[in-house]
Image: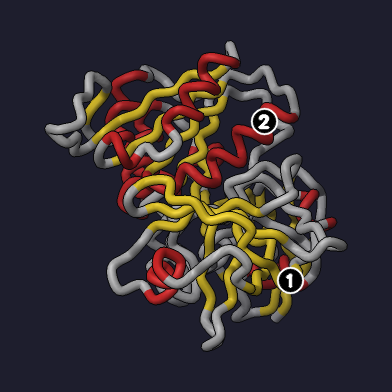
Amino acid sequence: MVFTVSVRPSGHRFEVQSGEAILDAALRQGIRLPYGCRNGECGSCKGRVQSGQITYPEGEPPALHSREQALGYAIVCQAHARSDLTLEIREIDTLNRIPIRTLPCRVARREPLCEDVMGLWLRLPKAERLQFLAGQYVDVLLADGRSRSFSLANAPEDDQFLELHIRHYHHGAFSDFVFSGMHEGTLLRIRGPLGGFVLNEGSRRPILCIAGGTGFAPIKGIIEHAFAQETVRPIHLYWGARSRGDLYLDGLARGWAEQHANVAYTPVLSDPRPDEPWSGRTGLVHEAVLEDFEALGEYEVYASGPPPMVEAIRVTLPRKGLDPGYLYSDSFERASDARPA
């Protein structure tokens, strides 16, 4: 059977086959809904079903909580239609104009940002530029056919190089290469831009950004893009890390707060080292947010980092009144086993 999905508020319509995921059908027909992992883990493709029925052939996805389900939300990368649907979801029209491309690039700069995070700046061929939205990611294509996904840490207004923040994982083949075998001039192939973790530019809501570890990378791109757009919306950044050294661009974030009246910055350490004096906040980063905000009903939240952090945010922040429809997340769980490398 074939069902029709009507998208609100854009007014777009597309058809979905019986047995086909709603997201797959939308992308196949040029309707660019937001997405991330495409396996039900990250929640980036969450939308509210206003009318009609859906089902999850593979079981309810991990990113969907009972409270959200009761409000009518669905994870459209896993949901299948059982009838015609009306779906309320943030369609990113700009994505329709950005082609996904495979391009060669070379390592122009390689700089340790802290003990286990390397910054890479990739240079495309002279005649090429990668058009992307702040917060998106690219796949680095490996010789064995696999890929590794990394968020773009620069804003699209600053696209001379593509900036990546790469954590070193024990026995991670690609990250071992980045830290020990890679050099300036190394040739790579990338595919992108990918993902729908991008700034909701049509909103006037205050922005709450929550980063964990190298989840700071896409948040950095989003915030710097907001600066380029001269936004006056309040922006509060919380950055959680284990120890002070893991806040690898702490000076940059503090500079944002000093230079922009609408920006606040709160770093939070979960395990500060005795040899690094720390008088700031300690504990888990989402708990610091819960302590600081009585109500989040007027906010939109951008959360990026390890899956346990993002999961805790999804569970706890709605208790403070956050509308799940305004929680945008990148849990660093991509398809094709991308992150642990």
Considering depth in this image, is 333 or 239 the residue closer to the camera? Answer: 239
Q: Looking at the image, is mark 2 or mark 1 nearer the viewer?
A: 1
328 left or right of 52 in image: left
Q: Residue at x 61, y 47 (%)?
A: 135
Residue drawn at the location 50% of the way across and 69% of the way down: 182
Name the residue nearer the viewer: 290 or 119.
Answer: 119
Q: Is residue 229 visible?
A: yes
Query: Can residue 197 be seen at all in this image of the molecule?
Result: no
Q: Which structural element holds mark 1?
A: strand
Kind of residue indicated by mark 1: Leu
**Residue sitting at x 53%, y 60%:** 150
Residue type at numbered disc 2: Ala
Q: Earlier in the sequence, mark 2 or mark 1?
A: 1
Q: Nearer the viewer, residue 333 or 267?
A: 267
What numbered label is drawn on residue 103? Answer: 1
Q: CA distance from mark 2 to mark 1?
A: 27 Å
Classify 51 as above or below 233: below
Label 2: few (<14), some (14–19) or many (≥20) C-alpha neighbours in 10 Å: some
Say how many tags the image has.
2
Indicate whether 263 appears above or below 310. Answer: above
Residue lying farthest to the top in this orientation: 261
